Amino acid sequence: MFDIEQFAADCRAALAERSSEAIRETVRRAVCEPQDIMAALGEQAGAFAGVLVRSPDLTILNVVWGLRQWTLPHNHHHRAVIGMYGGGEDNIFWRRLPEDAQGRVEAAGAASLRHGDVTVLGRDIIHSVTNPLDKLSYALHVYDGDFLSAEGKSCWHAETLAEIPYDGPTVSPMFGQALAR
């Protein structure tokens, strides 16, 4: 059975090893048993972002992507470990244009995650996310700090790709208000 307190303890132990592989494996073990996570956290009827753990050293979110939901490009200023326990998400990775006065970005790569996949995003990664499916997608997001209060985060305007201050409801209208609470 998935137990959030045990999972948080396991994540903290893996993060103490300072190894991306250790934290990836911890999250992988959890998401390979999606029925246990669903039993512990419940099913959702639509897009949902729930804070499971929030402390100075660790944030764990239960993220349920709505049908075809998207985010603007954004950064975290924390290492993020994303583990899919149902459905999928497509990530576009962005890089800053050198010496651009508006801080614009350009696409630099992509990754598709599906049930059971786990990826580690470095502290400086800029990414945008889309649930390409016509069904809900489920993920655990683990950050090596207090992601919700991290200062200096940015997002990028959808049309101009110019850098703007991070604003949760702008980055993802479906999640922003839930995480702001």
Image: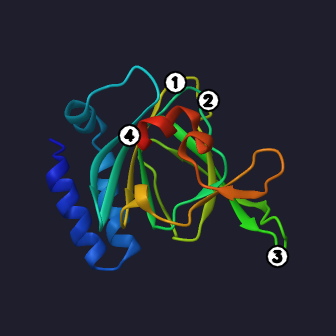
Real-space CA distance between mark 4 and mark 1, rounded to the nearest whole angstrom? 26 Å
Q: Which residue is mark 3?
A: 98
Q: Earlier in the sequence, mark 1 or mark 2?
A: 2
Q: Position of residue 61 (x, y in %)?
A: 36, 47
- Displayed quadrant of residue 166: bottom right
Q: Position of residue 168 (x, y in %)?
A: 54, 45
Left or right of 58? Residue 73 is right
Q: Earlier in the sequence, mark 4 or mark 2?
A: 2
Real-space CA distance between mark 3 and mark 1, rounded to the nearest whole angstrom? 38 Å
Give me the residue at 73% from left, 67% from top.
95
The three-letter amino acid code for the residue at tag 3 is Pro
Residue 41: tell me if it is visible: yes
Left or right of 99? Residue 9 is left
Real-space CA distance between mark 1 and mark 2, rounded to the nearest whole angstrom? 8 Å
User: What is the secondary structure assignment of the residue under circle 3?
Assistant: loop
Residue 68: mark: 2
Q: Position of residue 59 (x, y in %)?
A: 33, 57
Residue 84: mark: none
Mark 2 Cα-neighbour bin, 10 Å: few <14, some 14–19, many ≥20: some
Quadrant, the N terminus: top left
> Foreground: 3 or 116?
3
Real-space CA distance between mark 3 and mark 2, rounded to the nearest whole angstrom? 32 Å
Q: Which residue is mark 4?
A: 181
> Foreground: 113 or 17?
17
4 or 3: mark nearer the eye: 4
Mark 4 Cα-neighbour bin, 10 Å: few <14, some 14–19, many ≥20: few
The three-letter amino acid code for the residue at tag 4 is Arg
Give me the residue at 27% from left, 71% from top.
14
